[in-house]
Amino acid sequence: MTTTSDDDSKTIKIVMLGHSRVGKTTYMASLYGAMQQQRNGFKLKAPSNDDHQRLLNLSQIIAKGNYPLGTDQRKEYMFSLLHNDEEVFEFKWADYRGEAILLSGKTEEQARKLQEDLKYADGLILFCDSEALSRGDTQANQLGRLNSLIHHAVRDIETPMALAVVLTKSDMISAYTRPMIDHFSGLISAVNASEMVNGAFIPTACGVSSINVHVPLLYALHVMVYIKALYLNQLRERFEEEKRTRDEGRGVGDWIFSKMFGLPTDGELYELAKAKLYELEKIIEPTNESLKSLASSLEEFPLIDKDKSLDDYVEQLTAVRKLSSGNLLKRKSPWELY
């Protein structure tokens, strides 16, 4: 199992990643504004009053059609997730801007921190500008570098991770096309090759008429909590079997070997798995029905799947984009079914 040397390993973490001017600052504020109202019973709250006021003010400005400038600095937020106005858990949101993904000189420290965050991320939200994609401008999104980073992240992780590919500015294009999605072929292959990554494409738009703003977070929530719990339950069963074997005579040898090489013993790994599962079970119990309803709502979005072709992704993206736009006044998003 993956371990870290600090308390970060115990904190649920989401990493937001994308090049400059793809709409991350706008999205972040719009998401926070949208999540002040319940979505399937879930709300978002920033414990820091400064963050709360700044994000809320920005969201109100954006809702009037005015858009803020982005920055090239890493920003880290702590958020509380509420369900039916009761706090469920806190999570960390690391927002990487612009130059950090290029690993260039002045951002070397940010680049190092980015690689560390990606290794231990529970959720990764990757941003791409739909309008730039429609023009074939891959440089605007730095897709080559982003794909490389994702390949490394997918290769190194050892526990389930949610990957939401957020296609911003979807209201500025007439349709999604195969050449646009073809840029993600490598990423799709990497996700399909991993048993630990659950991915989805989610078209969004922020402004006077917002589309699917809160979907990426709730998608990541479903994977992080519900699917991760299933994984940890399987892990617990495996360790319980190993514990039975160890109790039959391997205990001393395992302890000596582990201490010689500075590794955790099977027993320590077993206890760690139980502790993580217990924490997630405390989260899942009061929100189980809402999480199940999130899962059924996700069927409308193009989840990354081995059986899908690029044309299938294009068809689903076009359908969910039109659905969100055409029914915006009656139904703000597919999540509001319950």
Image (cartoon, rainbow, N blue to C red):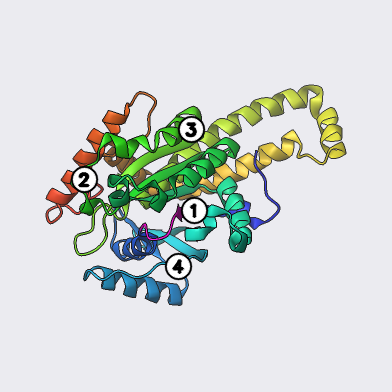
Residue 114 visible from this viewpoint: yes
Residue named by callout 1? 15
Q: Residue at x 87, y 34 (%)?
A: 256
| In this rendering, position of residue 111 left or right of residue 219 | right
Are there few (<14), some (14-19), or many (20+) residues within 10 Å of tag 3? some
- Mark with earlier residue (4, 2): 4
Residue named by callout 2? 321
Q: Secondary structure at mark 4?
A: loop
Q: Residue at x 81, y 36 (%)?
A: 258
Residue named by callout 4? 71
- Mark with earlier residue (4, 1): 1
Q: Residue at x 43, y 68 (%)?
A: 46
Give how far apart the Cα atoms at labels 1 and 2 are. 24 Å
Kind of residue indicated by mark 1: Val
Q: x%, y% of residue 34?
A: 29, 62
Give how far apart the Cα atoms at labels 4 and 1 are. 16 Å
Q: Which segment is the magenta one?
A: 16-22
**Looking at the image, residue 326 lies above or below residue 189:** below
Residue 281 visible from this viewpoint: no
Kind of residue indicated by mark 3: Ala
Residue named by callout 3? 190
Q: Secondary structure at mark 1?
A: strand
Q: x%, y% of residue 69?
A: 37, 70
Q: Secondary structure at mark 3?
A: helix
Are there few (<14), some (14-19), or many (20+) residues within 10 Å of tag 4? some
Q: Residue at x 82, y 41 (%)?
A: 262
Which of the 4 image quadrants contains residue 277? top right
Are there few (<14), some (14-19), or many (20+) residues within 10 Å of tag 1? many
Which of the 4 image quadrants contains residue 214? bottom left
- Residues at discs 4 and 2 in contact (Cβ within 8 Å): no
Closest to the observer, 236 or 145: 145
**Foreground: disc 3 or disc 4:** 4
